[in-house]
Amino acid sequence: MNNLTLIENAKPFGFPLSIHSAALIIIDMQRDFVEPGGFGESLGNRVQPLQDIIPVVKHVLTYWRQKEGLVIHTRESHLADLSDCPVSKRDRGNPTLRIGDSGPMGRILIRGEAGNAIVDELTPLHNEVVIDKPGKGAFYGTDLHRLLQSLGIDQLIFMGVTTEVCVQTSMREANDRGYECLLLEDATASYFPHFKLATLDMITAQGAIVGWTCTSEEFLKVIEKNE
Ligand code: C5J
């Protein structure tokens, strides 16, 4: 594969993909958010839009694994004693279940509980990185930046949920730290489809102020062409 290849149809303009210094990062595809009976649903959300992207995320992941690219999974999760969960976060909204409460898949958003696992279809392989993050962004309170720097990664290809919360926050954190970010449009979802669309616009506005977007098909086509 060439070192640099242009994804011409990316928005707002071509994304210069540097395959060897890029990592695929999958944000919070965990049962708590994606499956019925989890935290997302307890907040009154419809989880179907999140379930709908699983096949797309899996397709891209499978391809990236075949290319032996670096894969990073994140999980929004807290310690069992909730010492890393600010009261302001736990008390937010009026959910039927709060972070740390016992739900149908164990304690909500607590590390090691069944609901905190990545959905079966996307289970991380042993050689893949799993980042447990107490915040919305993947960099806050984690070693992610140090790890990426040590591996020479300077581009991040984003998939996952939810577009306007943990995905966008992680992209903004990444952008501030100097990473070029590309979000795969059909591999991200929100409980609120109009928030997803607005987020795609926000990310790419003002000359890619946060980053780029393109479809998974455009992304995979460009990689295939450069084999
Ligand atoms: C939320 C997330 N929505 N992964 N988490 O609280 O976007």
Image: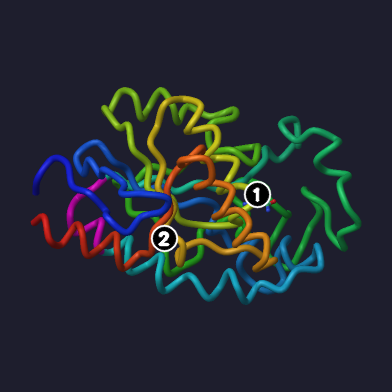
Residue at horizontal 55%, vertical 53%? Answer: 28
Location of residue 114 with respect to 6 vertically, above or below = below
Q: How many numbered badges does the structure rendering display?
A: 2
The coloring applied to the image is: rainbow
Location of residue 24 with respect to 206 vertically, above or below = below
Q: Which one is nearer the viewer's eye here, 169 or 207?
A: 207
Q: Which residue is mark 1?
A: 165
Q: Which one is nearer the viewer's eye here, 13 or 43?
A: 13
Residue at horizontal 20%, vertical 59%? Answer: 222
Cα distance, mark 2 to mark 1? 22 Å
Location of residue 207 with respect to 31 vertically, above or below = above
Indicate yes or no: mark 1 CB to ligand 1 under 8 Å: yes
- State the image coordinates of residue 221 (x, y, percent, origin top left): 22, 65
Q: Which residues are magenta?
A: 63-69
Verify whether residue 118 appears in magenta.
no
Left or right: 129 in relation to 62: right
Point out the frontmost of discs 2 and 1. 1
Residue at horizontal 76%, vertical 63%? Answer: 103
Disc number for residue 123: 2
Indicate yes or no: mark 2 CB to ligand 1 under 8 Å: no
Q: Which one is nearer the viewer's eye here, 9 or 151?
A: 9
Q: Where, quadrant-wise, is the C terminus in this rendering?
A: bottom left
Say what amino acid the circle numbered 2 marks: Thr
Say what amino acid the circle numbered 1 marks: Val
- State the image coordinates of residue 86 (x, y, percent, origin top left): 80, 33
